[in-house]
C-alpha cells in the first residue's frame, strides 16, 4: 500500500475498524519567506505516521494553526489511525465474496454464523468532549452545556 492510499477523514467511517493509535503531524514554515504549510502537507505527514503503524485510514482529523519559538507558522493535524475492515469477506464454505453482514451465502446457500461484534471501545472514538459526539446517542439527546444540539 502506498502512503497516499491511506484515507483521511474529518469524521468517523461507516464500516467496522480497529483503532491503532492517535497520530499527530506538525508541518511548519521554514523561514519568514517560505510558503505557509497547507492542509495537504499536514495530510501527507499524517499518512506517513499512519503508515508506520500499518493503518489504512485516519479518522476524526482536526487541524490547528499556531506559532512556536522555533518556527513562524505551524499547522498541526491530529487524528486516530485505524485499520478499516472491508465490507466484503470470503465465504468460509465456498470462498466466494459476500457481504460481511450476510446471513446466508448467495453462492453456496450455506447458513453463516453471525459476525462477532467488535468491542465498543474499538468502533467509536472521538477527540471532542464526550457529550457532543457519542455516536450511539440520538442527535435529539446530545447536549452542549445543557443546551440541546440539533
Image: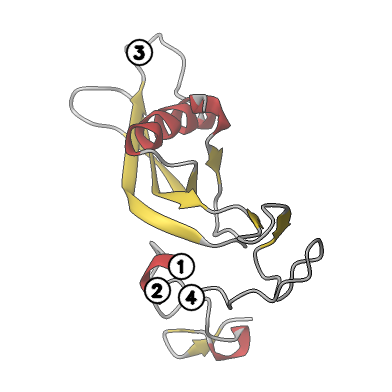
| Residue density around tag 4, few if under 14, some if 14–19, many if 20 or more, within 10 Å | few
Residue of label 3: 32
Q: Quadrant of residue 73?
A: top left
Q: Secondary structure at mark 4?
A: loop
Q: Which mark is residue 119?
A: 2
Nearer the camera: disc 3 or disc 2: 2
Q: Are marks 4 and 2 in contact (CB under 8 Å)?
A: yes
Looking at the rendered structure, the secondary structure element under dot 3 is loop
Q: Does any portion of residue 103 appear in the rendered image?
A: yes
Q: Would you say 82 lies left or right of 71 here? A: right
Q: Is residue 73 visible?
A: no
Residue bearing mark 1:
123
Per the model, the C-alpha gap separating discs 1 and 3 is 43 Å
**Percent position (x, y) of residue 93?**
65, 61
- Quarter of the image where one finds residue 112: bottom right
> Which numbered disc flags the more N-terminal residue, 3 or 4?
3
Q: What residue do we see at 69% from left, 56% from top?
A: 94
Q: Which residue shows up at 72% across the image and 72% down it?
A: 110
Query: Are the residues flagged by discs 2 and 1 in contact, CB closer than 8 Å?
Result: yes
Q: Between residue 72 and residue 13, name the one nearer to us.
A: 13
Amino acid at each position: 500500500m502506498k502512503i497516499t492510499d491511506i484515507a483521511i477523514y474529518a469524521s468517523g467511517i461507516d464500516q467496522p475498524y480497529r483503532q491503532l493509535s492517535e497520530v499527530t503531524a506538525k508541518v511548519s514554515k521554514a523561514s519568514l519567506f517560505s510558503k505557509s504549510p497547507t492542509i495537504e502537507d499536514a495530510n501527507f505527514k499524517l499518512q506517513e505516521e499512519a503508515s508506520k503503524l500499518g493503518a489504512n485510514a485516519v479518522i476524526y482529523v482536526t487541524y490547528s494553526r499556531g506559532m512556536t519559538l522555533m518556527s513562524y507558522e505551524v499547522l498541526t493535524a491530529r487524528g486516530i489511525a485505524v485499520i478499516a475492515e472491508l465490507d466484503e469477506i470470503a465465504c468460509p464454505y465456498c470462498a466466494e465474496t459476500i457481504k460481511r453482514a450476510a446471513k446466508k451465502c448467495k453462492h453456496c446457500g450455506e447458513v453463516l454464523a453471525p459476525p462477532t461484534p467488535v468491542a465498543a471501545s474499538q468502533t467509536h472514538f472521538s477527540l471532542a468532549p464526550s457529550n457532543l459526539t457519542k455516536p450511539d446517542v440520538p442527535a435529539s439527546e446530545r447536549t452542549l452545556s445543557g443546551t440541546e444540539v440539533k
